[in-house]
Amino acid sequence: MNDYILETENLGLRYGAFAALGSVDLKIKRGSIHTVIGPNGAGKTTLFHCLTGERKPSSGSIQFAGHDVTHQAPHKRVAVGMSRSFQITSLFQNLSVRENLRLAAQGRDGLAALAFWYSENHRRQHSDKADEVIERIKLGAVADTYAGELSHGQQRVLEVGMALCSSPQMLLLDEPTSGMGVDDIPVMTQLISELGQDHTVMLIEHNMKLVMSISDRITVMHQGNILIEGEPEVVSGDERVKKAYLGESGS
Amino acid sequence: MMKQKKSSLFGGVTLAALVTIIVMPLLLPSATLATEILIFAMAALACNLLLGYTGLLSFGQGIFFGGGAYVASICMIHWQFGLLEALLIAMLTGALLAGLVGALSIRRKGIYFVMLTLSFSQMAYFIAYSLSDWTGGDNGLLDIPRPPLMLLGFEVSDLVSSEAFYAFVGVLFMLIFVFARRVIHSPFGTTLVAIRENENRASAVGFSTNHFKLLAFVISGGITGIAGALYAMLLNFAPLSNIELQMSESILIMTIIGGTGSLFGSILGAGSIVLLGDILSSVWPRWMILLGIALIGVVLFMPSGLWGGVGSVADRWREYRRRKASAAKSSEVN
């Protein structure tokens, strides 16, 4: 079996003359926690959107677990085992936490969920999955609360939990700690490192402390291309990385 | 808590609907009026599937209503279709038209989607207007029969009396009501709510949202088509206004007034609009003005419709009872 679950080749996205993504060869090892960092405008989010299918790359290809997903629609990537969370919390606000998760689990069915002739309680597997994830993300106390009434930190956790419901091989997390308070960040750090034990996780993140403590590998992006890739110690000591963060003229 | 809410198909709201249907003809001056209410409740219920559960504001409901009415009537007049065959063909027509309108409209979102359904509605009107050999054009389609109800070769009822026709429509309504409850609490129905709540997320967790919206359209169109055919049988006449934009508006208004996202609300909405129209029009020829005022009142003061209003009054009553009880207790202590 291939060691890499996700491989991109020459992945690029141009808007006219501007290359948001130059030519990216990213390889993500099965079972690793792989973080993509970089200063603003480095192309992290563009890369992420190409991987989830929100943006169509203008060149290159994306291989995921033996499938060519380069031009696959976002919802179809769920069926092959890819799942994502959003940087800006995107939940079903007026539904309970449990129903949010149950729907997310149902999403893996794709078109089979068009069934309108039997009750949603008829087949238990989605509710069971929801309960399992509730336990895992420790939101049991608020399982029947509307998602919109949760605290911001809880919503961020639920956001990740939603991605978990489709039993994915790989989780793509877009800034999971975005907007979280200092007190909540350790909870998220703990959760992600736990998820890393049985999933491949790729994340974009700004919180360096979290990045350095949980990542197996780090890719640093700069101006649409990969600047350097390596283990946390290697990356944190690299001169070019410091330069990229401080700006070319920084001293 | 959520789980108990999703009660069985036949309990709760379904029971309330059944009681309403049984009591309605006893309270209203005529069975014909009651039948009209049920027919529009059917159309509003179908509209609710789109508006209340999927979040799609469709101005196309009149197309399916009028389309069902015309095709069923034409089949009965020219090819002597029986009652159930006519209703079946009306359902298929409504579903097919909704499939066409839906497939093209859902390619756009928000206001553009609404505009597309609006344009289709105008188009359907002019098609019906110009095909006057078939539809009777401006004069409407006259002399539409009301065939007897035949089951397995037996004539169950001739449906001539308005009471008999009401009973038939009532049974049909209950079947559709239970069907709609089943749809709402199915994997499909719960996914519709997910799309209403957050289409981006629904797509991200794996749902191909356009397929779901399209099926919602088809189901809604099928039910609306049946309602249209029943209306033609009730009046023995299919006016051009069946397929006018105003029909779509009326159905939407009934749905919103009754309360989106509640099936029983659709009965309340249709009932109150049809009744108000009936009462006010005998009082004052310009009754639409009064209806307008009533609508503004409901929208301003009962944002979740009549059904929501009933709920909040019930809540207040319980609150009042509780406070009274606790006041009595504290005075005892004193």
Image: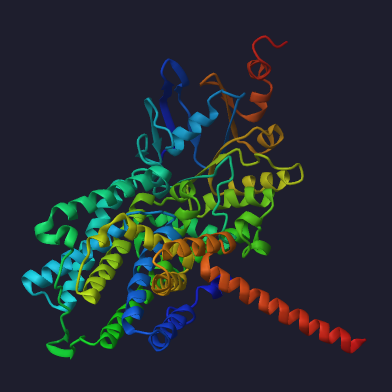
Q: Position of residue B104 (x, y in %)?
A: 28, 46
Q: Place residue B224 in its image quadrant.
A: bottom left
Total marks shown come to 0
Q: Is the residue B103 above or below the residue A73 in the image?
A: below
**Colouring of the image:** rainbow
Give B177 or B199, whichever is nearer the viewer. B177
Q: Position of residue B243 (x, y in %)?
A: 26, 59
Give B251 or A232, whichever is nearer the viewer. B251
Give A11 or A153, whichever is nearer the viewer. A153
Q: Can you name the residue that lies furthest to the left here? A: B79
Give A54 or B195, whichever is nearer the viewer. B195
Q: Is the residue B2 above or below the residue B12 in the image?
A: above
One can see residue A9 in this view: yes
Q: Tell me: B226 left or right of B78.
A: right
Q: Position of residue B64 (x, y in %)?
A: 26, 60
Q: Position of residue A243 (x, y in %)?
A: 66, 15
Q: Can you name the residue that lies furthest to the front here? A: B284
Q: Tell me: B69 left or right of A182.
A: left
One can see residue B261 in this view: no
Q: What is the quadrant of the N terminus of chain B in the image?
A: bottom right
* Residue pictured at 47% horizontal, 82% vertical: B16
Q: What is the quadrant of the C terminus of chain B in the image?
A: bottom right
